[in-house]
Amino acid sequence: MKLLDRPRSTLLAVAALLALPVLGEGLVRALGLPLPGALVGMLALLGGLIALGRVPRGLDAASAPLLRHLMLFFIPAVAGVTLHAARVAEEWLPFLAAGVVGAALALAVTALTLRWMLRRTGQGEDA
Amino acid sequence: MSAGPALMAPLGWPAVTLAAYAGSAWLYRRGGQHALLLPVLTGTAAVVLVLTATGTAYPEYFARARVLYWLVGPATVALAVPLFGQLDRLRRLWLPLGVALLAGSLTAIVSAVGIAWALGGSLETLRALAPKSATMPIALAVAERIGGPPSLAAVAVAVTGIAGAALARGLLDALRIRDAATRGFALGVAAHAIGTARALQAGPVAGAFAALAMGLNGIATAVLVPVVMAALGLA
């Protein structure tokens, strides 16, 4: 965490972003946590930012392009669907139905629960 | 043996992937950011086309393009920056947001697994679908951890995001959800980054709550999926 206290330069922030997934993975293995290592790295960085109270400029500069071009990094993994072409051809219905109906249900349940809770706690919309 | 792969080595495949992404990102902007033109879809299609044309096997491609995939980890860590920007809202509304997050996250996991199971999906498909509402780097890592193929999970995440973004306006209007924050939060929980992009088009309040919801649901999904799968006897 010392590394994160005052990253003075973008370079230091880049180094922290590269090191944290590895450190997170090490922590996950050592403690047997049921979480992805990168997520633990993300929570560690979030904790560091809360302790610091602001986002250092170098970190802002280093994270912006990573987040903007997130989809680029997924292409090599998604192209692996060619390995599963037979499965997708065979199971396209459960795949599509789970994706579409599941998304609709998640949208509806989240929105209705949040509206209900906001009204209950008196912070609701006036609609 | 085709001459293609030899010519592509060793920097070639990351460059091909980059070019495919640049082209698809341009197309996405030109096409008014239509959900079906998402760069992860069209860019992947372009790469698969090149692989087929040059007779390159996927494992060989992945071994060379892996350097790009390695950046998913640092990008996941970078999500802490936008999440930190939403902390004030989270502190103010932690109880309603927490309850809605839990309900939405559980619904996403159980409905995906339940629907696919009812329609005869294989165990690998169920495991790939379980984390599908989480943002892609987290969903891939969660799927891998429970024995679902990450590439299959990536497709499930993309299908979910596109469906959620496409359905949200009509569905939320029908339910008479008018509050921008509520609409954005639902989009972020159900449809991760694609839903967040959609919410941002509706306005800054919806976009901010969607970004917050996406980050929180990434954490919730990573915690809940192993528990739910164990409870359903699918772990």
Image (cartoon, helix red, strand yellow):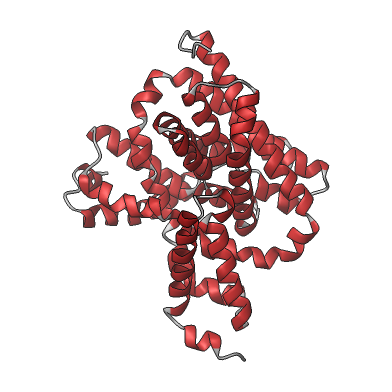
- The quadrant in which residue A77 appears is bottom right
Q: Is residue A95 visible?
A: yes
Assign the C terminus of chain B to one quadrant of the image. Answer: top right
Count the numbered circles shown.
Answer: 0
Q: Residue at x 45, y 56 (%)?
A: B72
Q: Residue at x 49, y 62 (%)?
A: B24
Q: Residue at x 61, y 59 (%)?
A: B151
Assign the N terminus of chain B to one quadrant of the image. Answer: bottom right
Residue A46 on image: x %, y %: 34, 38
Asked if residue A25 lies left or right of residue B108, the reply is left
- The quadrant in which residue B59 appears is bottom right
Depicted A23 relative to depicted B203: above or below: below
Residue A113 on image: x %, y %: 59, 20
Q: Hey, which residue is sitting farthest left in the picture? A: A8
Depicted A25 relative to depicted A54: above or below: below
Q: Is residue A72 visible?
A: no
Asked if residue B50 lies left or right of residue A50, the reply is right
Residue B4 on image: x %, y %: 54, 86
Depicted B144 relative to depicted B130: above or below: below
Asked if residue A20 lies left or right of residue A58, the reply is right
Residue B60 on image: x %, y %: 56, 77
